[in-house]
Amino acid sequence: MIIAGLAASGFSETAKGLLVLQIHPARLINDYIEIAGAGGALVNGALVGLVGFVLVLVAKIPFSGPTFAAILTMTGFGFFGKTPLNILPIIFGVYLSARLVGKRLRDYLIIALFGTALAPLVSTIAWELGLPPAAAILAGIAGGIATGFFLPAIAFSMLHLHQGYNLYNMGLTCGFLGLFAAALMKGLGHEYGDVFFWYEGSSLFLTLLIPVLSLFLIIAGFFRDGKKIWKSFREILSIPGRLPSDFVDLASSGGALLNSGLIGLGGSLYIYLIGAPFNGAVMGGLLTIMGFGAFGTHVSNAWPVVSGVVLATLVTGNDLNSPGPVLAAIFSTTLSPLAGEFGIPAGLAAGFIHLLMVLQTGGWHGGMNLYNNGFAGGLTASLIIAVIHWYRTSKEEF
């Protein structure tokens, strides 16, 4: 991605764009391709992903579904919201939380990596409150550290709400914490301005980037597993996907890579068919669902949920290629375990409700939770699971 970024924009423009992103507000939706060009966005995404990758190596955590999903998610959101500077305070805060309870960072590293969803909180404090430069930077760092410190405690509690049927559990966690952060800042007099940067240009280079990466993952999967890959892939398709479903552990790394690549190709085809742009937000979303292709999402349990979002979009009179429905369709796969566990009707219902929710929840936390679809998905999954469990329990008693 770094090489691709330099090839797309040249060294000078890429470096300039990269620097601009480090001091730019990061709340939803800030499409970094629109702000800094393809070069700056690509390099920024790569650097954010490298932070996660290096931490995984330093912590000596083996390749697994969660680590693959975390690194690709970080990389993806490096296209719209995360920078190397605004994620590090949060990671350090999680480290301090781990040390307080006598654990190592590796024990909470997945929480730390996914918890960078609240990176815009750091940028908001540093660049939007109007503080003097030195005080702004220190306040942003302090806010990020405090945020990371509380993430582990909240993450474990949020998991019980949806019982593992929302793959983006940290989206619900960060949305919950983001509500309090937004309320605090509004209470202190800060008014959130509208933020909307959405690249609508057309570029063959950007259009082909995700499909090429997807093909690379598929080829890597075949090199890894050989002919056994199809057996592993069939095993993956039989897994409902409920957290924690590590396809690398439950099937094989080759099968997980094949599934990830197919999801990337399928997502790219959907974006192409509806005529949406391959911009920073869209490519970030595709990279995220490719990551979860090793950790809960597969082609069998994803399509019913996406179909539910498409149905809701048409019923409500929205355009399939408008920003909200586009991102909702991609990220709705956070609810794939519902379709995997309870069937197609549950998946359709989950996708339908998800679109209605996600169009509302972004304003609740002021756009500071990048995983807004995870927040909406967590609420949707909690509702559906509560109804299903009530029905089953009542039916057994009757």
Image (cartoon, grey):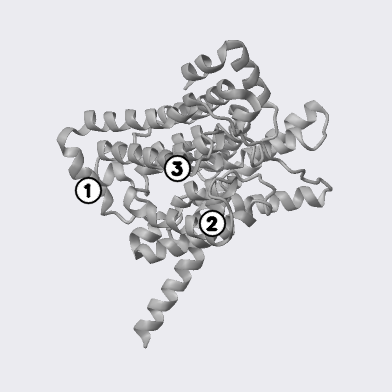
Residue 8: x and y, percent? 52, 17
Q: Is residue 157 visible?
A: no
Q: Say whether marks 3 and 2 touch (CB < 8 Å).
A: no
| Amino acid on which the number 3 mark rests in the picture | Leu
What residue is shown at x 18% (from left), y 44% (from top)? 231
Residue 378, placed above or below residue 4: below
- The label nearer to you, 1 versus 3, is 3
Of 388 and 324, the residue lying toward us: 324
| Amino acid on which the number 2 mark rests in the picture | Thr
Looking at the image, residue 319 sits to the left or right of residue 19; the answer is left
What residue is shown at x 64% (from left), y 21% (from top)? 17
In the rendered image, which quarter is residue 145 located in?
top right
| Amino acid on which the number 1 mark rests in the picture | Arg
Residue 208: x and y, percent? 43, 28
Disc 3 secondary structure class: helix
**Residue on which the image places disc 1:** 234
**Residue on which the image places disc 3:** 273
What residue is shown at x 26% (from left), y 40% (from top)? 255
**Residue on which the image places disc 2:** 313
- The label nearer to you, 1 versus 2, is 2
Q: Earlier in the sequence, mark 1 or mark 2?
A: 1
Q: Earlier in the sequence, mark 1 or mark 3?
A: 1
